[in-house]
Image (cartoon, helix red, strand yellow):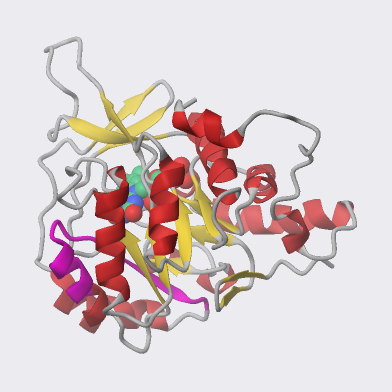
Amino acid sequence: MVDLSVKIGDITLQNPIQPASGAFSWEYNDVIDLNRLGALVAKTICREPRLGNPTPRMAETEAGIIQSIGLPGKGIEYFVDHIVPEYARFKPPLVVSVNSDNIEDFAALAEELSVPDVDVIEANISCPTRNQTGGNFAMHEDYTRDCITAIRAKTKKPLWVKLSPNAGDIVSIARAAEAAGADALAIANTFLSLKIRTDNFRPALGNKFGGLVSPALKPIVLRMVYQVAKQVKIPIIGIGGVTKAEDVVEYMLAGASAVGIGYAGFRNPTALVQIIDDLEAWCDERGIKKVTELIGAVKDADMETDTLAAASIGV
Ligand SMILES: Cc1cc2nc3c(=O)[nH]c(=O)nc-3n(C[C@H](O)[C@H](O)[C@H](O)COP(=O)(O)O)c2cc1C
């Protein structure tokens, strides 16, 4: 039987499947056994309680949903006192996602979240509807460097950094995050998008813009993971459009060590566990002994396309 375990820096995951932040909560345990997941990833938390964006916060498109939830939450104190203990009942490592629109506060939050039951801090520097100096630092390599350097100085916990697919050159941002001390990269957050209603000519979302989430985006994020994997040494978690075990395989072949899953879990809450079972069967059928054999194993050495040229023109 295949060994599905993977390492993300010093953290060992029993398999490469984890939920994506904001598309999951411990309450999923009513439907699936959370102890089967590679990691548990909490919804991004901010310092103060937040109601979130004006409604409607979600709209359907022909190819997935656009959403602008606005990071609602009860603030960091409540999170540490009440939410962390809910997750701590389960075995997989707990990844807590954090965001702030101010770099100093971001770093202070990371420090305050560095409590014993938290295994990993995920810096969500890529909230698509914020501006690039106000929480969406991943749009620019200098802001990324400054933000991650500040956070790194305040926490010894493993630090994962969630990047934006909306940045012009994600490879430069990835390198900046690595140089500033990130232990892993989560690629990627949602694609900034807009829907306009034709009945009343109004934007469909209360916040106007939202993030597009769709299986159609997988090839684009896969391309980003591939390009970044060639240029950084730290592990990558591929996030975008995973709906089946073969998608996990594709991300791993492109260089990811694990994947995050959001959308598929909305459509079917048992999807994450099904994908773990299917991945195991997929590997067993092919005699793959360790899933880590797949990482970066794409066979393209005879192909000449310049990876970085493609990155800089934003193909
Ligand atoms: C309703 C919703 C809420 C989300 N909230 C967050 C969040 O709080 N923090 C974050 O980093 N990403 C958030 N995301 C983005 C997801 O973590 C993930 O990056 C994105 O959905 C792409 O993965 P998928 O194609 O598997 O859904 C959210 C996505 C959705 C659909």
- Tell me the quadrant of the picture where the N terminus can be found: bottom right
Q: Is residue 44 visible?
A: no
Q: Is residue 276 magenta?
A: no
Q: Residue at x 16, y 22 (%)?
A: 203
- In the rendered image, residue 7, in percent from the top left (x then y), is placed at 61, 71
Q: Is residue 144 left or right of residue 178?
A: left
Q: Is residue 232 left or right of residue 77?
A: right
Q: Residue at x 66, y 28 (%)?
A: 305
- In the rendered image, residue 23, in percent from the top left (x then y), is placed at 37, 53
- In the rendered image, residue 149, in percent from the top left (x then y), is placed at 30, 67
Q: Is residue 295 visible?
A: yes
Bounds of the magenta span?
Answer: 92-109
Q: Nearer the viewer, residue 90 or 3?
A: 3
Q: Residue at x 62, y 46 (%)?
A: 251
Q: Nearer the viewer, residue 240 or 188?
A: 188
Splitting the image into 4 quarters, where does residue 129 fall?
top left
Splitting the image into 4 quarters, where does residue 258 fall?
bottom right
Looking at the image, which residue sits at the far bottom? 116
Vertical placement of 202 versus 259: above or below?
A: above
